[in-house]
Image (cartoon, rainbow, N blue to C red):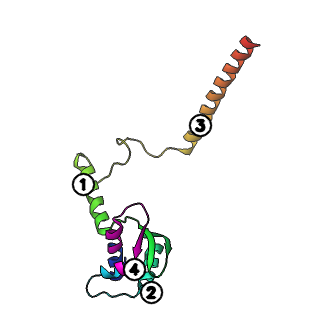
Amino acid sequence: MLSIESQAIYDILCDITELSEVYKIVDADEINEKLPVGITLTKVQLSQIIRDLKDRDYVDIKYFTPDEYCLRVIKRVDPVEKQTSVEEESAESTAGETENPGERQLYGPKRGGGAVKPGLVLFMSFLGGVIGSGFVAAITAILLKFVI
């Protein structure tokens, strides 16, 4: 969760850079001009907030001086927006289901089975290895008989 000043700086940087994927040079005075009424920051405080945003992966900084910053803003999803989008996705996925409407369906249709036994997995992988080796041996024998 960002402080009020950090959120204001992040919003200003989003407006200035337009959330593009390229680095842009932003002047400290330009940021201070766009600050909302009631928030005043010195250049030292501004650079500290921008460093904090960098540490939290909100911005990526190429270089900075006290007067200008070369940075790009990383698009972040607000936790409130993220929560509503998850609720909308779950509502969409359960809209077509008739049985167990609260249960999410992750991969394909629901199957009737349970946990796979480790011994069965071991046996099937051993069987696959034997069959694969048999094919390779048969092809090798055919090649040796007809080629040599």
Work out whether 51 lies above or below 77. Answer: below
Q: Is mark 3 on a helix, strand or loop?
A: helix
Question: Distance between the Cα atoms at labels 2 and 1?
Answer: 47 Å
> Which amino acid, by three-letter code, is at mark 4?
Ala
Label 4 belongs to which residue? Answer: 28
Mark 3 or 4: the one toward you: 4
Residue tagged 1:
91
Viewer-closest of 53 and 21: 21
Of pointers 2 and 1, the one earlier in the residue sequence: 2
Res. 112 image quadrant:
top left
Q: Nearer the viewer, mark 1 or mark 4?
A: 4
How many numbered discs, if any? 4
Residue numbers of the magenta segment: 12-30
Give the Cα separation between the discs numbered 3 and 4.
63 Å
If you read the primary sequence from the N terminus, does the residue marked by circle 1 or circle 4 appear first? 4
In this view, 82 is above or below 125:
below
